[in-house]
């Protein structure tokens, strides 16, 4: 068994879509980034790559490469799953937390879990997504950005 941790953060900005776990969420701002800036999926990918000791998403999908401009993070996740599988690993489970003051994410959690499980080729029971606020403290609490953490267990085949 191999354990990995991922963390990502993106600034909220005008004229951007808010996409988390592959779900477009209605909000007055979206996340700013080279790709679609899906902070949850980015944390998941870094956790998976870290568990397999295969670097990070910046190494695999550099923001200096225009082919990743506005990329769909769910497609990038599919590539990370393939890379981890090719290295001999399968997903045991993942546990993730999104930190955002707003919007309220509870109505979207189950579809995020289903999206991630579908891309990873696993059962939704292996995917945990939680959301919390920071009680108006820090950059997430003041609405400047959204962050996410993820811990992943990979199993060697």
Image (cartoon, rainbow, N blue to C red):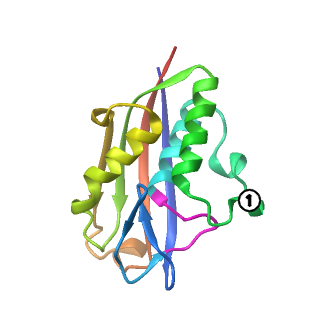
Could you tell me residue 153's position as x and y percent? Answer: 43, 29
Q: Range of the magenta residues?
A: 31-39
Q: Is residue 6 left or right of residue 26?
A: right
Up the image or down, 143 lies above or below 21; here it is below
> Residue 73 location in percent, x, y?
54, 55
Residue 154 to residue 45: above or below: above
Question: Secondary structure beneath disc 1?
Answer: helix
Residue 65: where, in percent of width, then height? 77, 59
The image position of residue 46, as x and y in percent, is: 55, 45
User: In front here: 72 or 51?
Assistant: 72
**Nearest the eye: 89 or 6:** 89
Instruction: Say whether residue 124 is left or right of residue 76.
Output: left
Mark 1 is surrounded, within 10 Å at the Cα level, by few (under 14), some (14 to 19) or many (20 or more) other residues, namely few
Res 28 quadrant in image: bottom left
Left or right of 139 on screen, residue 111: left
> What residue is shown at x 52% (from left), y 68% (from top)?
10
Identify the residue at the far left of this view: 107
Magenta span: chief secondary structure: loop
Q: Which residue is mark 1?
A: 67
Front residue (pair 53, 79):
79
In magenta segment, residue 56? no
Where, by quadrant of the figure, is residue 105 drawn?
Answer: bottom left
**Residue at the spot x=34%, y=68% of the render?**
100
Residue most toward the top?
A: 157
In the figure, 82 relative to 69: above or below? above
For the point 51% across and 41% down, which residue is it? 47
Labels in figure, total: 1
Q: Is residue 32 magenta?
A: yes
């Amino acid at each position: 068994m191999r354990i990995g941790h991922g963390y990502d953060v993106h600034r909220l900005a005008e004229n951007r879509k808010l996409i988390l776990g592959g779900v477009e969420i209605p909000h007055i701002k979206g996340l700013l980034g080279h790709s679609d800036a899906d902070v949850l999926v980015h944390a998941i990918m870094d956790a998976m790559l870290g568990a397999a000791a295969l670097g990070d998403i910046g190494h695999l999908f550099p923001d200096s490469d225009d082919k990743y401009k506005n990329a769909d993070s769910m497609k990038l996740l599919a590539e990370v799953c393939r890379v981890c599988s090719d290295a001999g690993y399968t997903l045991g489970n993942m546990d993730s937390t999104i930190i955002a003051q707003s919007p309220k994410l509870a109505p979207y959690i189950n579809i995020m879990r289903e999206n991630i499980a579908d891309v990873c080729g696993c059962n939704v029971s292996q995917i945990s997504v939680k959301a919390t606020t920071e009680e108006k403290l820090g950059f997430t609490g003041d609405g400047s950005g959204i962050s996410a953490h993820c811990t992943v267990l990979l199993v060697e085949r």
